[in-house]
Amino acid sequence: MSLLELQGLTKRYGGIVAVNDVTMAVEEGEVRAVIGPNGAGKTSLFHLITGVVKPTVGEIHFGGHRVSAMPAFGRCQLGMSRTFQITALFPEMSARENTRLAAQARDPKRWLPLGGGGVFAEAARRGDAALERLGLTHVAERPAGLLSHGDQRLLEVAMALAQQPRLLLMDEPTQGLSVEETAQAVDVLAGLFAGGGLTVLLVEHDMEVVFRLATKMTVLHRGTVIADGDPDSVKADPVVQDAYLGGYA
Amino acid sequence: MRMLLAVALLLALLPFGLPPYAMTLLTEALIMGLFAMSLDLMVGYARLISFGHAAAYGLGAYTCGNILLHTDIPLPFAVLLAGLFSGIVAIGVAWVCTQATGVSFSMLTLAFAQLLYAVAFKWTPVTGASDGLAGIPRSPGPFGVTWFATKSGFYYLTMACLIGGFLFARALVRSPFGAVLRGIRENEAKTLSLGYNTRLYKIAVVAASYMLGGLAGALYAPFAGFANTELLFWLLSGQVLIMVIVGGTGTLVGPILGAVFFLFVQQQLSTYTDSWALFFGVIFIGFVLFAPEGILGLARRWTRAH
Amino acid sequence: MTGLNRRTLLSAAAAAPVVLRHARGETPIKIGMPLALTGPSGEIGQQMRHGAEFWLKEVNAAGGLLGRQVALQIEDTTGDPATCVRKAQEVVERDGCKLLFGMVLSSEALAVVPKLAEWNAIFMSSDNGDGRLTGSSFVPNFFRANISGPMETRVISLWLREGQMKKFFALGMDYAWGHNSIGVFKDEVTKAGKTFLGDVYSPIGTKDFSTYITKIRQSGADGCFLVLQGDDNAAFLSQAHEYRLSDRVQLITSIVDLNSIHAVGDAAIGLAGSTRYVATIDNPANKAFVADWQKQFNALPDVFEGEQYQACKMLQAGIEAAKSIDAEKLRPALEVATIDSIKGKIAMRACDHQAVQGGYIVKVKKQDGAKYPVPEIIATFPGDKVTPACRQMTFES
Amino acid sequence: MDVSAFLVTQSLNALSQAALLFFLGCGLTLIFGIMRIVNFAHGAFFMLGAYVGWSAVGLTGSFWAALLFAPILVGGFGAAFEMGLLRRLYGRDGHAFLMVTFGLTLIMGEAIRLIWGVNALQVEIPKLLSGIVFILDEPFPIYRLFLAGAGIVVAIGIWQFLERTRLGLLIRATSQNAEMVHALGTDVRLVRSAVFGIGCGLAGIGGVLAAPMVTASLGMAPNAVIDTFVIVIIGGMGSFLGSMIGAVLVAFVQVFGSYFFPDFAMSFMYLIMATILVFRPGGLLGKEA
């Protein structure tokens, strides 16, 4: 069984069909990118998977659990961690506190109202390890709100990593970054994914980024999956070429 | 910690140097301080701006008043029980109010408090309606000890509640639970997406806040010897919110200072002039313009400069 | 040094300047007066302050009491019982007041009276109407110089017995005073063989009285008894006038004061009711009082000004008889105190500390040349008919 | 009295009360829509309207002059307050506005007490409106008909103002997206001052119109501000139409509630508010929570 399975997933807003009968799967260990032109339904699909919105029709299974009606925080507890399209951090906390709070969410004693030194120590250890992996140790004590854009994006990834997720969901990880920042961020991410052990689902429309990072691709067009496979075969697919990639390939 | 000990020692010694009226005022200031600090748990740590915190105070006061009037439960236990009761009621209140966020949350808390106010006006057997409950005794005990009923004994009881409440609140905000609250304060959506069921945390903090606020109200009833509907009125909710802001939100100590400041300044001003409200208003606006971080922030800035 | 010694020393140090200032005589007699000077009841509080200050000037000009000057320590309570308790405690503990005036609202008084024994202080009320203060909530250190709510109602019902009206309805503010007064009224009119049709209570702060006016009209009553105060009273009278209610129903109010009349102007014309004090009472003491008052303020004294002055005179009589302000000595003296003042002869009653006094019924009429309508006395009733049995709120006969 | 007469007169009466609530609520909601702040001092502006109205009647002898003059003065004062004080605080959190407007409430209340005294002041209904008419044999004050009419006229006026005029367009645009309006070269600060002034001016109209019914008194502000909150919350903060619906709903509930269930008159308003917020956290016509 795949880690994440979507079956016949449909989301309608009034008369508009944002996601139409999508069936796809994410296997353990793959880095899958969902691509598609603006309005293809990428963000809606992402919201369905993370639990921000509930599907009109269809089922979502994650790690063997049916999560279609589960609230967002419940899915996180099963091992989904996500980053946002517009960076979402705790701006007044230090980078270290950000990752610590993220790691704490995986601790069964995360709600402890008194004491909790052990919880903090364990969370800090995981958080620091995540900062290290993304090369952010040198800014660990700085308030997150004062970091550069690039570092803020990476910090968000570090927060997700600190949760030791089974599935890392990334919504446009290079959105809003300058060309240089994008290049740097992609380098770091590529290194991270190359290390293995991570399962990633990312939504992105910068094709260069996608081809650099993804091992599998799903192409959405008007809410429907029009192609699925490894990057090379998708790139070669005439339907995809016609619908989206245009002159790129 | 050393600072806390010093303050506790100072508070403990004050009864030996202060005239009785100042003791009375100080006792009330400490009660108000506890009340304001309880609200800071919500406002300062989870950005839950309550416009109806008088509900906690009034619940505590009426509960404690009824316990003392109708049972033989000793004063200290009655106070604790009333605080606990207020906290339990809060779970229901919070469950409803946390359906909403932002201004709507504030308004729901206001609606709830005003509903309680309206109920208190009609539920004569329990609340005494518009007359309130008068002649609330300071029941002796435990073990027949009557010391808590004396002026200084009651002061020490209040002090113990304040310090205990403060230690509890401080442990709470420094715990893993408190870390999540700070997350909610800074970015609730992100906290939710990290896998925290934020609504439960909010309900829990409202309950803790109501419990301490109820404790303050529970102290007030035997302190003044009466409880009436004013203790549930929105004006008190507004005042305590101002105390928290004047003192400095998210600091626990600040709101206590804010309450003490509020009470003493009002007391002094109103002795000198009928127009005390005018000066009071000017002071608030002055704080916003010149000391946006409140009394505590002002004090910190001052100590840094010197 | 023990705590006790240190405290004594501190208080001695604090008292030192006062001693110096009054080196020739004794320290002044301080009377604490917590009052609602601001807030919704502020107008009554301000009247009480005027009345007390007027008396203060008079008594100090005549050499003070027991050879000591008298001083008032006035504090604003905003009409909030919690603040009132704090302020009362403050004037007692900080300023050393053993005598108290003031406390506009009965809720304030009810909150304060349980503390009087602990403070060893005497409170002379000039305004609190709640019957329970001299009834179920009676405490030995409380005295009431004014007419209480049940007494006002009694005056009205005595007047109604003689009148033509048969059927009555009542509207009161939804708090203790309203419920108490209407309870007495219901009792009284039923005993007089008349019909009580029903009652309704409006929440404090009601702005629109139209539904209540509709109810009054629908009831088919000849007369409607009103127990309203302050803003609510003014709003009701304005709106009753708007609806021409008084064309059909005689409005009878438990208390007629100049302030309300001034607030609603011609809308008050035709209103009948009891009053605690009115400047036109015909006796030499009142004539002198009104003349002096007019000289000072260029206005007529209003209800609470007169009542406060009378309360001051009552306390004065007690102090002069006891030759002390100590509660233990003053209490017995006050219990038998009598004065002949602006409302004639008035005697304090030992059994419940209620001053026995007559009541007045006035009707508001248009007077040529006057800016506002004026209340005119149309009936008076003697004290023995008006004052309830000891510690009771109901009446025999 | 027959049932239809009762229903008609009480409904008309509820409409007249709704008009008064609307003058308050509409201003508060406009201000919230533009500035995202809760103006605690709104009740104080309402009260100021009543007192200025009283003085204006005294000076000019005309209620109509007062109705013109008082809102201008109150609105001007509001705009001045916005320009002098509130303007410095944009970008700060909500606490700052709460404190400043609460402080202003205290200052205005006391200033009014110092200027006009503690006694309630009477404003006479103008001769033209002081009579009663008979509706299905039930007497009904002309002044209340006038109030209901004034409410409807002002509501239509504001609606047209928001829809048709340039300033109205700017106000709507600013409440949608202030940065965009700013980027398009309009001085958002002026829009804010104008809206704050208009909002306070509307409260001032309410004050002048309420004075003949309830007299000008110091208790007006605290009572008014809480009612106003309720209707704005019910309608949805920032929604003009919502404040209208909220005002009508609250007025009808109060009038009929206090008739049929006088014991619960005080609770109704809050019960409705809580119920609506639980099911629609943003209010009836509010956008979000």
Image: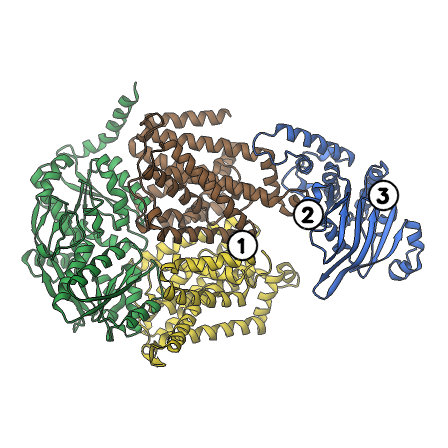
Chain colours: A blue, B brown, C green, D yellow
Q: Which mark is residue A72?
A: 2
Between A229 and C48, the residue placed more toward the observer is: A229
Q: Residue furthest top?
A: C1
Label 3 or label 2, whichever comes before in sequence order: 3
Figure check: B38 above or below D191: above
**Label 3 is placed on what type of residue?**
Glu
Is label 2 in a helix, a strand or a loop? helix
Name which residue lies at 46% across and 63% down. Answer: D200
* Mark pair 1, 3: CA separation: 44 Å
Residue C299 in sight in this render? no
Residue D181 in sight in this render? yes
Q: Are marks 1 and 2 on the same chain?
A: no
Is label 1 in a helix, a strand or a loop? helix
In the rendered structure, are the residues bearing label 3 and label 2 in contact, judged by CB atoms less than 8 Å apart?
no
| Residue C3 picture location, percent across and down | 30, 22
Q: Which mark is residue B104?
A: 1
Name which residue lies at 74% across and 33% down. Answer: A137
**Around disc 3, counting alpha carbons within 10 Å, would you say few (fewer than 14), some (14 to 19), or many (20 or more)?**
some
* Mark pair 1, 2: CA separation: 23 Å
Q: Chain of mark 3?
A: A
Looking at the rendering, in which quadrant would you find the N terminus of chain D?
bottom left
Q: Which mark's residue is nearer the viewer, 1 or 2?
A: 2
**Label 1 is placed on what type of residue?**
Ser
Residue to which mark 3 is pinned:
A30
Looking at the rendering, in which quadrant would you find the C terminus of chain D?
bottom right
Q: Are marks 1 and 3 on the same chain?
A: no
**Around disc 1, counting alpha carbons within 10 Å, would you say few (fewer than 14), some (14 to 19), or many (20 or more)?**
many
Number of marks present in the image shown: 3
Q: Chain of mark 1?
A: B
